[in-house]
Amino acid sequence: NLIPMKKIFGFMVLAIAIFALSSCGGGNTPSAVVEKAVKCIQAEDYEGYVNLMNIEVKEGEDIENAKTMLVALMKEKGGKSMKEKEGIKSYEILSEEIAEDGNTAVVKVKIVYGNGTEDEQKIKLVKDKDGEWKLSDAK
C-alpha cells in the first residue's frame, strides 16, 4: 500500500516543481521578455537588449550591422540617461495584455531609479517569424 502513495506523492512534487518553474517568467512570455530587457539595461548589457528586439531590415541590409549600430546608440543615449537617473533600483510588471490574434502584446512596467524617480512605461511586443516574443520598435 505504501508504493502507490509514494508514487502519487512523487508525481505531486514533480507537478508542483514544473508549475513553479513555468510561472517564474523563465519562458517566452511578453512579461518575461520585458523583465529580461530591464535586467539587460540594469547590467548595461545593450547587446543583450538589442537581441530581444524585433529588428526588421530592408532587403539587402545587414541585420548584424543594424544590431551593432543600435548597440552603439543605446550605449551612448541609454548609458547617459542611466547615469543621470543613478541606474534602475527596482522594477515591477504591472500588467500584460495580449491581443486577440496572439501576435502583439503590451506590458506595463513600473521602474524605480536610483535617484528616487519613478517611471511607468507601456512596452509593445510582437511575435517574430519563429513565434518568439520580441520588443517591438513600433511607436
Image (spheres, rainbow, N blue to C red):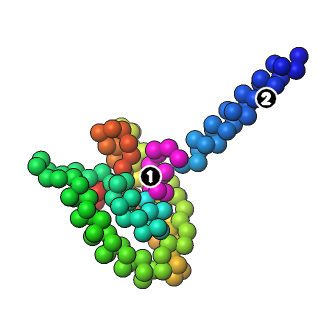
Mark-to-mark CA distance, 1 and 2: 34 Å
Circle 1 residue: 33
Instruction: Judge whether residue 104 can be spotted in this image.
Output: no
Circle 2 residue: 9
Q: Residue 114: x and y, percent?
A: 52, 78
Q: Residue 77: x and y, percent?
A: 31, 75
Q: Residue at 46% across / 71% down in the picture?
A: 119
Instruction: State yes or no: discs 1 and 2 in contact (Cβ < 8 Å).
Output: no
Judged from the image, the secondary structure of the residue bearing numbered disc 1 is helix
Q: In which quarter of the image is residue 13?
A: top right
What amino acid type should be assigned to the residue bearing mark 2?
A: Phe
Which quadrant is home to the C terminus?
bottom left
Instruction: Judge whether residue 45 can be spotted in this image.
Output: yes
Horizontal relation, residue 54 to residue 85: left or right:
left
Q: In this view, does 30 lie above or below 42?
A: above
Based on the picture, tell me whether residue 130 belongs to the magenta stretch: no
Which quadrant is home to the N terminus?
top right
Judged from the image, the secondary structure of the residue bearing numbered disc 2 is helix
Circle 1 crowding by C-alpha within 10 Å: few under 14, some 14–19, many from 20: many
Q: Residue 85: x and y, percent?
A: 45, 80
